[in-house]
Image: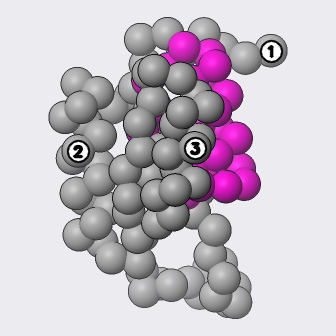
Amino acid sequence: MVADLTGKSILVVGAASGSGRAIGLLSAAAGADVAFAARRIDRLEQAAAEAGDNSFALACDVRHPEECQRVTDQAAEVLGGLDAVVYAPGLSALSRFEDAGEDL
């Protein structure tokens, strides 16, 4: 069962593929306005188009904190605020989770 997200605004970071894309698509299907964010703009635009008129794509490389801030600000401006941010980027660096730093 999917909750009714009508009227909610969600930013999904890491939304080009995998769980981030799935979360964005499910959120849009449940009525949310969704900003899809990741590095691969072509895949984001496909996901946003599949999600419908209440979704859009924003390019963002999470390895750069200033880009994360920019995309959060843009999404909040376009959507009139944010009710949730989902952070689901795929990372390829190998380390123990508790040892990971901001530069991962």
Up/down of 4 relative to 37, above or below: above
Q: Is residue 42 left or right of residue 80?
A: right
Does dot 1 land on a helix, a strand or a loop? loop
Q: Earlier in the sequence, mark 1 or mark 3?
A: 1
Residue 34 visible in rendering? yes
Q: Earlier in the sequence, mark 1 or mark 2?
A: 1
In the rendered view, how is the structure colored? one colour
Q: Position of residue 28 (x, y in %)?
A: 57, 24
Q: Earlier in the sequence, mark 3 or mark 2?
A: 3
Residue 46, labelled with which disc? Answer: 3
Residue 12 visible in rendering? no
Residue located 29% across and 40% down the image? 75
Mark 1, residue position: 1
**Residues rendered magenta in the picture:** 14-35
Query: Label 1 vs label 3: CA separation?
Result: 25 Å
Residue located 58% across and 28% down the image? 51
Callout 1, which amino acid? Met
Mark 2, residue position: 74
Residue located 54% across and 14% down the image? 31
Magenta segment: does it hold 8?
Answer: no
Up/down of 61 relative to 42, above or below: below
